[in-house]
């Protein structure tokens, strides 16, 4: 062309920044003119700061809404659009591709091979077919297993940088005060707090080369705790993928979940205690067709309620993990399972009483009606969540999120936690795979 390629990276404040850092930041052959943003609120309208973008971008890089994509391609004479976010149907990916091609830009999907960072210590990666399949409980299960082996374990979480990006370049979480110090959102707390409860140090942020270097200094094993259904950022010695038979078929129809299945060393078909045998068998058959070499095992996702006596015979509102209901497209989760098992008289639909941003969430994700998504990307959303709980005519709140909601909001109604874990149907197989991977690392 006689000039550097002009690039726009389509993202959601995660994979997009990582691809830029690993592939484009120091490339003289490319100039990134913008990021676009979707899925996550309050990201568009900001900039990827100069301190992270590097010397070639002294003004930083603007982040614009994906809704402006066609105009952006024309206005900035974009040569190539890089798709860099996750948990979207294959048809959605191709609709965006068609939009880019029609506007005059090539369309690019980057492979894990070109974006994964090598580690000097063994890496076990846990990813998934869809958001809400059970990555976090699987990671916690493996962390306990590794500690029982005498290993120092550090969990590295997929990015959720919703605040000051430069301050969030490399974050370390070892206790609850770190969550407050870094002003974590509810979604961040949902992912970090259970690891802290489990005795693990957690790293996350924006610059994963810096994060990896720090994590390597205190780990015998690094656990990559993936977000959505994204690909690992670190090259794994063992790649474990969690599949969800409550959404059977998604392993072949969602990006990049299908890629994860095809890359997997081991696939855990989770939630076998909630799904039908037909659905479980269908997922197993699909996985074996896509990746004949992968080990496939079954697991349950048992749910326990802290205080069943507070729930039995009561009208409850259920709070579920937000992303599982939004781009994860589920209509219920562990909270509903726990409330029903504990004998709740009625699960009250909170959507008619939704306040502010929660009303907008239901409008965008009608599948979430019936339960309350724990949307908390900022103080205003946390306040809306509390106000919606107070307005809903119920006796008790059953919280299926992985955190103690009482640490981030105050409501007049009692809050009972529903907790979930991983239980292998054939105990020992996962540990055998982990030991084998560590021996070969």
Image (tube, rainbow, N blue to C red):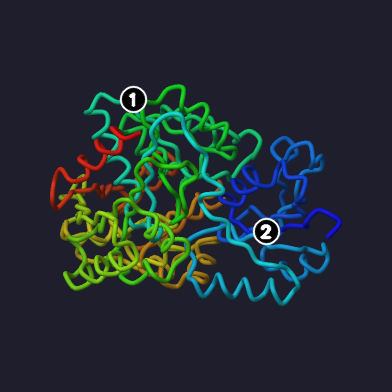
* Snapshot quadrant of residue 296: bottom left
The location of residue 90, given as percent across then percent down, is 49, 71
Residue at 20% of width from left, 63% of height from top?
274
Front-lying residue, 313 or 16: 16
* Snapshot quadrant of residue 169: top right
The location of residue 10, given as percent across then percent down, is 64, 59
- Residue beneath disc 1: 152
Residue at 59% of width from left, 36% of height from top?
168
Residue placed furthest toward the left: 426
- Residue beneath disc 2: 36
* Snapshot quadrant of residue 55: top right
The location of residue 338, given as percent across then percent down, is 22, 56
Disc 1 packing (10 Å; few <14; some 14–19; many ≥20)? some
Mark 2 / mark 1, whichever is N-terminal: 2
Residue placed furthest toward the right: 2
Badge 1 marks a residue whose secondary structure is: loop
Residue at 31% of width from left, 35% of height from top?
440
Q: Is residue 81 left or right of residue 73?
A: left
Badge 2 marks a residue whose secondary structure is: strand
Q: In this view, does 302 lie to the left or right of 80?
A: left
Residue at 68% of width from left, 68% of height from top?
67
Disc 2 packing (10 Å; few <14; some 14–19; many ≥20)? many
Q: How many dots with numbers?
A: 2
Q: In this view, does 260 lie to the left or right of 244?
A: right
Q: Is residue 340 above or below residue 99?
A: above
Front-lying residue, 124 or 370: 124
Front-lying residue, 314 or 61: 61
């Amino acid at each position: 062309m006689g000039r550097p390629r002009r690039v726009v990276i389509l993202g959601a404040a995660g994979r997009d920044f990582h691809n830029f850092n690993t592939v484009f930041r120091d490339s003289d052959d490319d100039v990134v003119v913008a990021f676009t943003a979707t899925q996550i609120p309050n990201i568009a309208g900001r900039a990827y700061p100069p301190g992270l973008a590097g010397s070639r971008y002294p003004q930083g890089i603007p982040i614009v809404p994906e809704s402006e994509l066609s105009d952006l391609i024309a206005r900035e004479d974009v040569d190539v659009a890089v798709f860099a976010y996750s948990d979207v149907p294959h048809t959605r990916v191709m609709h965006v591709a068609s939009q880019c091609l029609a506007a005059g830009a090539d369309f690019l999907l980057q492979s894990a091979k070109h974006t994964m960072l090598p580690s000097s210590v063994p890496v076990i990666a846990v990813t998934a077919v869809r958001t809400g399949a059970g990555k976090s409980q699987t990671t916690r299960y493996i962390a306990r297993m590794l500690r029982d082996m005498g290993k120092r374990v550090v969990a590295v979480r997929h990015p959720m940088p919703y605040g000051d990006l430069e301050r969030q370049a490399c974050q370390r979480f070892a206790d609850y005060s770190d969550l407050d110090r870094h002003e974590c959102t509810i979604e961040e707390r949902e992912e970090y707090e259970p690891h802290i409860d489990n005795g693990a140090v957690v790293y996350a942020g924006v610059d994963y080369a810096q994060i990896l270097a720090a994590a390597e200094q205190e780990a015998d094993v690094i656990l990559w705790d993936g977000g959505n259904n994204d690909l690992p950022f670190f090259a794994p010695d063992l790649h474990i993928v969690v599949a969800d038979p409550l959404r059977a078929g998604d392993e072949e129809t969602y990006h990049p979940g299908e890629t994860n299945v095809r890359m997997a060393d081991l696939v855990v078909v989770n939630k076998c205690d909630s799904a039908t045998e037909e659905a479980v068998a269908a997922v197993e058959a699909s996985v074996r067709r896509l990746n004949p070499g992968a080990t496939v095992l079954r697991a349950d996702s048992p749910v326990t309620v802290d205080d069943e006596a507070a729930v039995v015979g009561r009208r409850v509102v259920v709070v579920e993990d937000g992303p599982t209901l939004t781009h994860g497209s589920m209509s219920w989760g562990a909270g509903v399972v726990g409330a029903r098992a504990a004998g709740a008289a009625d699960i009250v639909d909170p959507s008619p009483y939704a306040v502010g941003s929660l009303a907008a969430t239901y409008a965008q994700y009608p599948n979430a009606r019936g339960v309350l998504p724990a949307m908390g990307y900022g103080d205003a959303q946390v306040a809306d969540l509390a106000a919606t709980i107070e307005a809903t005519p119920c006796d008790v709140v059953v919280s299926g999120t992985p955190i103690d909601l009482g640490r981030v909001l105050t409501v007049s109604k009692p809050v009972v936690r529903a907790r979930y874990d991983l239980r292998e149907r054939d105990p020992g197989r996962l540990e055998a795979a982990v030991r084998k991977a560590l021996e070969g690392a």
